[in-house]
Image: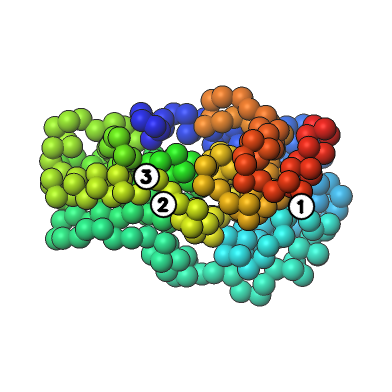
């Protein structure tokens, strides 16, 4: 799903770029640990370099044990149980010492997703949800091709911060299998519907959706397309900074209602961004430089922070 057309193939390319694209480069750089690195193909790409560095420095590290530690770290970060970025840990023992004894269980993850989801309508056949965070969008969008449900390169916040409200509609008795889960994007000016395969729905299929449900989607989309500073802060509180979020971070920075406090919180995330990447999977960008420039251009950025940004830009 894109604004306003489907992009399942681009999402797939974006996921490939963020994983194999970077992992292959590290295998070339560290040929002695190439086989070990292959075990981490499904780990968040932002952790690849740290993992490669640790495996290269200490050949005694057991890759499977390290992978379990990384997964635990990722969950703990998402839950704000640990706030330091992975690259702040100089060694695996240092990371192990910092991790909490217990991280969230699958049951807890379900509860968290439900807490960040609004049920707008429910009857014997249909359930209409509004995800309020990317982890909620990912959880309830399982087994679809939507970019708002992707574990890597999830674009929930990108669309939301660009004025589109996201809705998930579940149908217990769909006329076609791909209509069991439907995603709708709605703003003050338009509403679009996509099936579970991320294809724009036919008019005849949209007409099958009860008018009362479509009215809720249009009404909520019109009301919520403009995001206040308070709502923006709440979104950031829900923001999962442990996953690859470059496009979403840029959307936060460029929002007209960003506050000085929010810009200050975003700066450390910008400094963790890769120097280059692929915007929405197909447009080459200089992520960190673009983000720093966007912060300079936002009047909400404090003067003291702008001085730091100018210093960082000189180094790029």
For image coordinates 87% across by 50% down, the residue present is 57
**Circle 3 residue:** 225
Q: Residue 159, percent across and down?
A: 44, 40
Vertically, is 189 above or below 121? above
Q: Spatial distance from mark 3 to mark 1, Cα to Cα?
A: 36 Å
Residue 137: numbered disc:
2
The answer to whether the residue labelled 3 contacts the one labelled 2, judged by CB atoms less than 8 Å apart, is no
Position of the N terminus, as image quadrant, is top left
Q: Is residue 107 left or right of residue 104?
A: left
Q: Secondary structure at mark 3?
A: loop
Q: Is residue 234 visible?
A: yes
In-front residue for pair 152/254: 254
Write down the quadrant of residue 287 in the picture. top right
Q: Is residue 61 left or right of residue 301?
A: right
Residue 87: numbered disc:
1
Q: Is residue 249 left or right of residue 229?
A: right
């Amino acid at each position: 799903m894109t604004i306003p057309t489907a992009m399942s193939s681009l999402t797939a390319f974006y996921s490939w770029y963020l994983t194999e694209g970077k992992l292959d480069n590290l295998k070339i750089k560290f040929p002695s640990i190439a086989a070990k690195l292959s075990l981490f193909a499904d780990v968040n790409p932002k952790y690849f370099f740290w993992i490669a560095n640790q495996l290269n420095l200490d050949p005694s590290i057991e890759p499977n044990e390290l992978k379990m530690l990384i997964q635990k770290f990722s969950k703990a970060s998402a839950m704000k149980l640990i706030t330091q970025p992975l690259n702040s840990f100089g060694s695996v023992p240092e990371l192990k010492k910092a991790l909490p004894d217990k991280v969230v269980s699958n049951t807890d993850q379900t509860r968290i997703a439900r807490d960040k989801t609004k049920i707008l309508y429910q009857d014997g056949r249909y359930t209409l949800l509004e995800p309020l965070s990317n982890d909620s969008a990912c959880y309830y969008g399982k087994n679809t091709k939507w970019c708002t449900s992707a574990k890597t390169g999830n674009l929930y916040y990108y669309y939301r911060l660009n004025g589109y409200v996201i809705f998930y509609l579940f149908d217990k008795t769909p006329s076609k299998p791909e209509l069991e889960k439907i995603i709708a994007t709605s703003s003050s000016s338009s509403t679009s519907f996509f099936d579970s395969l991320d294809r724009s729905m036919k008019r005849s299929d949209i007409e099958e959706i009860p008018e009362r449900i479509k009215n809720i989607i249009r009404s909520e989309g019109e009301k919520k397309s403009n995001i206040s500073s308070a709502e923006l802060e709440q979104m950031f509180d829900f923001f999962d900074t442990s996953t690859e979020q470059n496009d979403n971070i840029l959307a936060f920075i460029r929002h007209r209602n960003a506050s000085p406090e929010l810009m200050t919180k975003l700066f450390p995330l910008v400094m963790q961004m890769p120097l280059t990447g692929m915007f929405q999977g197909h447009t080459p960008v200089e992520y960190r430089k673009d983000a720093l420039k966007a912060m300079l251009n936002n009047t909400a950025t404090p003067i003291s922070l702008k001085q730091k940004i100018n210093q960082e830009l000189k180094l790029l």
